[in-house]
Image (cartoon, grey):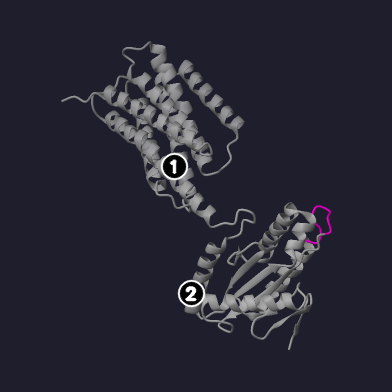
Amino acid sequence: MTFDISTLAFARGVVAIVGGVILLMHWWQDRAAWSALWWAIASSGTGVGIILLAMHDTLPIYASTRVGPLALDICAALVWVAARIFNRRSVNPYSVLAALGVWIGLLVFTALHTNVQLAIALGVAISASLFAAAGAEFWLARTEGLRGRWPMIVVLGSEAVALFLAAIQYSSSALTLPTIGWFGIIHFVGLVYAGGSVIFLIMMLNDRSEAKHKAAALVDPLTGLANRRAFMDRAQRFLDRTVRDNVPFSILALDLDRFKKINDTFGHPTGDHVLRTFSDVAAKVLRPGDIAGRIGGEEFAVALPDCGVEAALAVARRIRSTFQDDANFVNGKPVGATLSVGVATAPEHGQTLAEIIASADHALYRAKGIGRNRVILAASLSGDSDPGTVVRIA
C-alpha cells in the first residue's frame, strides 16, 4: 500500500487557501482585526506555494522549485507578523522587509555557490524558526484568557517541529520524495495546522471582540469610569471580601457643585471636559485596587477596600483639593468647578452595600447643604468647613 504524498500536499494547500478566504471574510466584517488580514494573506500564500510544490510533475520547474518555496518563506514571516499584530505588539515594516531580503539573498547565494538541496533545507529551517517565534508570541500574551490561545500554540509548535524535521530530511537525503515516512507525517501535520490555525485564530478574535463588547457595556463612554452596574457589582465583591477578612471598607459619594450652572454658562463641551477632569483626578489619586464609577449625570462614587475612616477621609480630601485645582480653568475659561464628598465606612456606617451608600449619600447632601466644596463623614458628620481642614460639626 502506497501513500500519495503529493495528493496530501495538494489537499493541504487547498485547505490553506480556503482558510485564507475565511479569514479575509472575517476581516471584511471586522476591519479592526488586522491580524486576520495578515494571517489570511499568509494562509492563502502558503496554500499557493504548497500546491506549486505538489504539482512539480506538471508545472514548469521554475514555478515549482523557485516560486513555491519563495512563497512559503514569505508567508512564514507573515505568520509571525500576524501573531505580533494580534498581541498588539509593534511591527517595523522596514525591518521585516530588510530581514526578508537578507533571508532570500542568503538562500540564493547558497543555491548558487553550494547546492539547491542545502538552500531548501536552510529555508525550511528558517521558516520553522518563524513558526516557533509566532507560537512564542501567543505564549507571551497568555495572561489574556482566550479559548483558542493554547490550541494555537500547539499547532504552531507542531508545524515548527514538522518543518525542522523536513529541514533535516532535506539536508540528509535526495530531493525525490519517498512514498511513505517523515514527509507523510510532515504534510499531515501541515494539513492540521492549515485548518486548525484558522479556526483557533477566529476563536480568539471572537473571544476578544466579545470581551471588548462586555467591557464597553460596563464603562461610562464619556469618562471611562465604571458605570453604575459595574460599580455596584465590584463594590459588592469588595464588601464581601472585607467582611470575610474582617477589614474596613469605605464608600465615597461625590457630586459636582453647581454643574448645571457650568453647562448653562460655559456650554456642554466644557461641562463634559469637567466630567473627564474628575476621571483624570481619580486615576491620579486612587490606588490600583480602588474603583471609581459614574453613578449619574454629575454623581460619582468610589469604593475603597481595606480603607478605614481616617484613610478614606484623606483620600476624599485629596480628590476634592486636586479636582478644585485641575478644574479651576478649562481651556482658559474660569470655570471654578468644585465637588462635595460624603464618606461612609463599614461597619461603622452600615452592614450592607445599600446601607453604606445611603450613609455616604446622606453625608454628601449635608456637605452640599452647608456650603459645598467640602468633605463630610457619615453619622458623626465630620467634614471640611474650610476646604483642606477637617473639623467637627455639631
Q: Can residue 153 be seen here?
A: yes
| Secondary structure category for the residue under label 1 | helix
Q: Position of residue 1 (x, y in %)?
A: 15, 25
Residue 307, numbered label: none
Q: Amino acid at mark 1?
A: Gly
Q: In the image shown, does 63 or 173 lie closer to the viewer?
A: 63
Taking 112 as reference, is 219 left or right?
right
Q: Amino acid at mark 2?
A: Asp
Task: Look at 48% across and 36% down and name the residue there.
Answer: 29
Task: Look at 71% across and 68% down and name the residue there.
Answer: 319
Residue 284 drawn above or below residue 366: above
Query: What range is drawn magenta here?
Result: 327-334
Which comes sooner in the sequence, label 1 or label 2?
A: 1
Question: Magenta span has 291?
Answer: no
Badge 2 is on which residue? 240
- Looking at the rendered structure, the number of numbered marks drawn on it comes to 2
Residue 135, numbered label: 1
